[in-house]
Image (cartoon, rainbow, N blue to C red):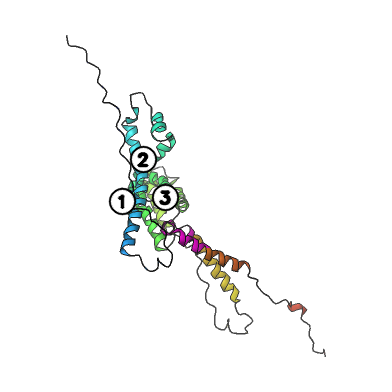
Amino acid sequence: MGTALEPRQSAGPVPLRDQPFTLAHWAATLPERDITPEEASGPLTVEEQEELAECHRAIDNARSAQWLLGRALEIVRRRRLYRGDGTRTWEHYLAAEHDGMTVREARRLQDEWRLAKAVQDALGKPAPASHVRAMLDYADSTSNEQAASDYVMLRKSFESGQMRLAAHQITARVTKALESGAAENDPQIRRQAVEHRWREIHAPQPSIPAPAKAPDNAQTASGSKDAQDPLLGAADAAERALERLNQGLLDEAATLRRAAVDAEHLQKRLRKVGRILAKVVVPADDVIDAEIVDDEPRG
C-alpha cells in the first residue's frame, strides 16, 4: 500500500507587496519655490515644457490607476485570490487589504474599468472618473466602445467651443438619449434609437451670451432721444465677463498650472474690481417729465 500523502508545506509568509509608483518613476521633483508673474512671462521654455509634461504624466497615471484598481479587484474576486489561508471571504479581504472598502464600492470599480479603458484608448489619455461614471448607463445600452467613441466626440465638441465639459452635462445628455429607447423592447432597435438621439443632442450649447448688436449710427447720434444708454452696454460686458470668470474657476487644467503666487495676484485684482463695482452709483434725471412746468404764458 502506498503511504498517505503528506500535507503540503506552506510556502512561508506572503511576501511584501511591490512598492507603488514614487516620484522617482517620472523624475519629477517638487519646486523649491514659486516664481513670480514677472519671472513667468512669455512662453514656456523647453525645460518648463518638460516639467509640465512630467506633471501631466503623474496626473494621467493617477487616473489610469483608478480603473486599473477596478480590474485588479475583478481578478482577485473571480480567481478567488482573496481567500488567503482558505477561510478569508471577499468582504474580509476588502476590509483588511483595502482599508475597509465596501462590497458596493468594489463592485462599482469593477463595473467601470472596461469603459474607462475604452475611453482612454479612444481619447489618448485617461478621462476623469466622474465622466466615466456619467457614461456608464449609456455604455450599458450600447457598448463600451460606442460609449467611448461618443464621449470623445462630445468632449471635442466642447473643447472646440472653448468650454469645459462637466459630469452633470454628460448625465443630462445620457438621460435624454436613453429616453428615446425606453419604449423599445428589441435590444438592437433600442440601441440604434439611443445612438441616434445622442448624435442629435451631443453638440454643446454656448453658455456665453453673444455680444449685443451694435446700434445704428442714427440711433447713437449725439442728442438723439433714442440713443442707447452707454451703461447698458457696460453692464452687458460685465455680465459676459462674470460668465467667463465662472468658467475660468471651473477649469481644472488651468488650476493645476497656476502657481500660488499667481492665484494670490489674481485674487487681489478681482477683489479690486469688485470693490469698484460695489461703489458704482447709476445717475438718472431726477425731473419727471409729467412735472415739467411750462413757463411760457398761455394764450
Q: Is residue 252 magenta?
A: yes
| Marks 2,1: beta carbons within 8 A | no
* Mark 1: few/some/many CA within 10 Å (<14, 14-19, 20+): few
Q: Which mark is residue 70?
A: 2
Q: Which residue is mark 3?
A: 131
CA distance separating discs 3 and 2: 16 Å
Residue 286: name its quadrant.
Answer: bottom right
Whichever of callouts 2 and 1 sits on the residue coming sooner in the sequence is 1
Whichever of callouts 3 and 1 sits on the residue coming sooner in the sequence is 1
140 with respect to 2 (left or right) = right
260 with respect to 3 (left or right) = right
Residue 132 position in % (x across, y down): 40, 48
70 with respect to 4 (left or right) = right
Q: Nearer the viewer, mark 3 or mark 1?
A: 1
* Mark 2: few/some/many CA within 10 Å (<14, 14-19, 20+): many
* Image quarter in which the N terminus is found: top left
Which residue appears at 27% of the width and 26% of the height? Answer: 12
Q: Secondary structure at mark 2?
A: helix
CA distance separating discs 3 and 1: 26 Å
14 with respect to 168 (left or right) = left
Q: Which residue is mark 1?
A: 26
Residue 165 position in % (x across, y down): 43, 56
Residue closer to the observer: 118 or 283: 283
CA distance separating discs 2 and 1: 23 Å
Q: Is residue 156 magenta?
A: no
Magenta region: 248-267
Tell me the kind of residue under disc 3.
His
Q: Secondary structure at mark 3?
A: helix
